[in-house]
Image (tube, grey):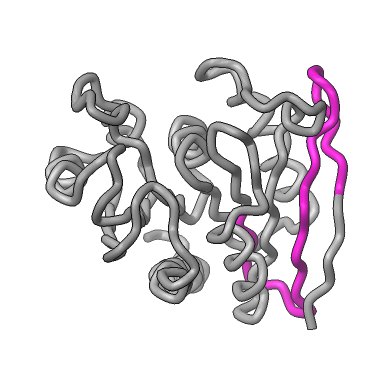
Amino acid sequence: MTTSATLEVDTDQGPGRLHLAIPDAVRGAIVLGGGASGQVATVDLTALADHLPDQGWVVARYELPWRVAGRSVGPRPPGSDPLWQAGVEVVRERWPGVPMVTGGRSAGARIACRTWAPWGAGIVALSFPLHAPGRPTPTRLAELQPVGVPVLLVSGDRDPYGSPDELTNAVSAPQAGQRQLVIIPGATHSFPVRTVPAVLAAVAGFLTLALQSNADELADPSR
């Protein structure tokens, strides 16, 4: 059984809002942010909130304070980073000791990469915007390379923010942690409903590995 709840996050720029999907038996927690509009009721994020609790994951979709206040666009990077970290800390404190994964789609994936923490079990980056459409340079590779935890990148094969070849080359460059790239056929920067099962399968597989890695670390703290 999954319980739905909302939780307010206090920040110095007003309240943020966590939309929670909570399983009866919690094995891990994942915090997901929206794209440039801050919308967290997208097809992909909603599907993750609907299905991942069945595997024991709390899914927390986080509306940043500027979105809660009714604004359609947030501050320029890295203006939202401390606001995002406030929401992550609330989830971490509520479910201490379980594996914590962060992520989101597009701009939310960028924020998660910029604010990664060594205690995190990984990052789920949906439609990571490697560059602006039609402008292959400059890239956002500098936000991805230093992340020292595993990162799953899930992108459409027609995404104007980063082609499969561009993303493959990006993750082939020196990285601080493990990278997994999954390309979704028939998707652009968003994921049509028909592609959602492939997105769910990629994320679920990544989270299963995160749980296993955490279990192995608990069994052998010297790792």
Q: Quadrant of the C terminus?
A: bottom left
Query: What residue lies at 42% left-to-right and 67% top-to-bottom?
Result: 199
The percent coordinates of residue 126 (x first, y second) are: 43, 51
Query: What residue lies at 28% left-to-right and 62% top-to-bottom?
Result: 182
Image check: 120 left or right of 205? right
- The segment highlighted magenta reads 7-30
Q: Is residue 24 above or below residue 193?
A: below
Residue 14 is one of the magenta-drawn residues: yes
Residue 171 is one of the magenta-drawn residues: no
Quadrant position of residue 75: top right
Quadrant position of residue 100: bottom right
Mark count: 0
The percent coordinates of residue 48 (x first, y second) are: 58, 66
The percent coordinates of residue 64 (x first, y second) are: 71, 33
Image check: 20 left or right of 208? right
Image check: 207 left or right of 66? left
Image check: 109 left or right of 144? right
